[in-house]
Amino acid sequence: MKKILIVDDDPDIVEVTKLILEIEDYQVLGLDNPNNVIDNVRSYRPDLLILDVMLGDIDGREICHHLKTSSDTKHIPILMFSAVHDFKSIRDNRCEADDFISKPYDMVTMLEKVRQLTTA
């Protein structure tokens, strides 16, 4: 069973996304607090990280950059999502995310991106 970590400061988005993914037989850990994300990634060892760009005072792009430049986490695919930013602005900010989805997201599109990133 593939493990997914979701990080968004909106608990409703975390819960809905978690439920959708669990129905599809993924093991999911949801965090609505961006503190200690990197420690959670290292301990949970997800097959995919779904990460919001705007996490209150924390920029998800910086978390993405840190994870993608660390030898022990750079292999983990990252799907960024945002209601404000687009994929180009994310990549322009040193974030090497593997994919992107706009919020509010289409469930079918999100699941397809998750499938692609967890089978690569």
Image: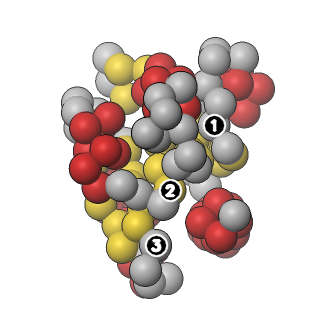
Please tell me which residue is depicted at 23% across the width and 33% down the height of the picture.
36
Marks 2,3: beta carbons within 8 A: yes
Please tell me which residue is depicted at 32% across the width and 35% down the height of the picture.
38
Is residue 83 shown left or right of residue 59? right
Is residue 77 shown left or right of residue 21? right
Please tell me which residue is depicted at 32% across the width and 17% down the height of the picture.
57
Residue 117, by quadrant, is bottom right
Can see residue 86?
no
Residue 48, labelled with which disc? Answer: 2
Marks 3,1: beta carbons within 8 A: no
Label 2 vs label 3: CA separation?
Answer: 8 Å
Residue 2, labelled with which disc? Answer: 3
Which circle's residue, 2 or 3, is located before the other in the chain? Answer: 3
Residue that numbered label 1 is attached to:
97
Label 2 vs label 1: CA separation?
Answer: 11 Å
Which circle's residue, 2 or 1, is located before the other in the chain? Answer: 2
Can see residue 47?
yes
Label 3 vs label 1: CA separation?
Answer: 19 Å
Residue 5, labelled with which disc? Answer: none
- Amino acid type at image mark 3: Lys
- Amino acid type at image mark 1: Ala
User: 12 or 75, which is in the foreground?
Assistant: 75
Q: Which residue extends farthest right?
A: 88
Question: How many other residues sit within 10 Å of disc 1, few (<14), some (14-19) or many (≥20)?
Answer: many
User: 93 or 46, which is in the foreground?
Assistant: 46
**Is 20 situated above or below 81?**
below
**Is 113 situated above or below 108?**
above
User: What is the secondary structure assignment of the residue under circle 2?
Assistant: strand
